[in-house]
Image: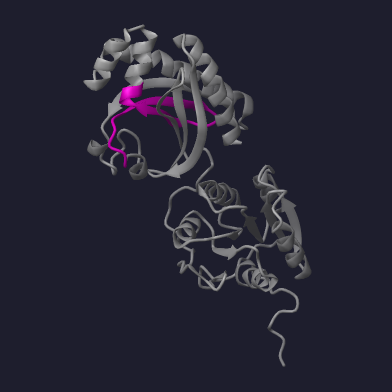
Amino acid sequence: MIDKVLEFARTKIDADVSGLLGVQLTTANPDARLFSKADFFESVDKKVLTRMRVEGEMAGEAFIAVSLRDAILLGGTLIMLPEGEIGKHINNEIFGEDESDAFGEIANIIAGVYSSGFEELYPQKIRVFKSDIEVVEPHKVDIASDLPFPDQVYYVSSSAMQIDGNKLGALEILLPAELFGLAEPEHPPAEEPEAQPAVAGGSASAAVEAGKPSEACSSLVLVIADLDNADGPVFVETLQSCGYTVESMTFADNVKDVLQETGARGVFLVLSEVTDKGVADIIKTKSACGSASPLIAAGPRWTRSTVLQAVKYGACDIVVTPPLPDEIKQKAYVHLGMEPEGGDSESG
């Protein structure tokens, strides 16, 4: 849902800011991924950060970020500075009161667009308002402090800007992942077994040593996959053959509602690709699951890094796809607390 809001806003920003500037602004190649505060400030270029208050059924702060040079260019264009003067200001990093006020008007338009997007498309009733603007030098940022924003995980949507065909840097919006349901609240993982990921022989050995099985009271297992993902039916059929009640869902379905209504013994999340979007899907699904329902993530071409990310953000184990039915059964036995029919416990 959040990606629909961001795409709605991106296309409307092009039209509204272009109308304000009198030149054609375009944003393209949107890319959304999770960043820590340290990740975001790895670049050395100065940034202009605009705070946006989030009010309504949710409360917090989101942020708009552009490079300092782009803020000078956009502000200078709005107040119709001569091209040579804008170039001089960019080279000398002059972001004076006039350029700052002008860029503030542009940021206000952008914040209004996001607010409209959330009001029209987001389940919670929220509004977004532009607050203050500041220039941030990444190398001076104290990651542990709350300035210019707290050290937490952010969902960052980045789009490449152009003005009349001339390339600029990126327009970025930062959403606190926890506030928008894209990450679980940070707390000590008291009951999480330690992960020991390993990928070998074309399949993943258990990413987590077997801990206590889930004590969920439901026999329902959710399998979440894209409709065109050929691996999804394999999980459904294998789990059904083991005696589980299986419900097949897509990423567009409201998993949280199903879990709140009936509960689930566990969830298999079947990714078409193990990418940043896949990690975001793990975070969103785990947020819906909470601690009651183990989440097993499946996908192709896992690396040590992506396994560690999956485990960090809530997966208790992984499966390499295309899957082997016996491996699916074993994961179900270890993590769901019910032995599949035809298991190995029969005495000889």
User: Is residue 179 visible to us here?
Assistant: no
Q: Is residue 284 left or right of residue 104?
A: right
In the rendered image, the vertical position of residue 138 relative to residue 11, given as above or below:
below
The residue drawn where x is 66% and y is 46% is 251
- Quadrant assignment for the C terminus: bottom right
The count of marks equals 0
User: Is residue 295 visible to us here?
Assistant: yes
Write the start and end of the magenta stretch as one range: 42-70
Give the quadrant of residue 89. Answer: top left
Magenta stretch contains residue 54: yes
Give the quadrant of residue 81. Answer: top left
Magenta stretch contains residue 179: no
x and y percentages locating residue 278 in the rendered image: 55, 50
- Quadrant assignment for the N terminus: top right
Most distant residue in the bottom direction: 348
The residue drawn where x is 24% and y is 16% is 88
The residue drawn where x is 75% and y is 55% is 247
x and y percentages locating residue 176 in the rendered image: 45, 38
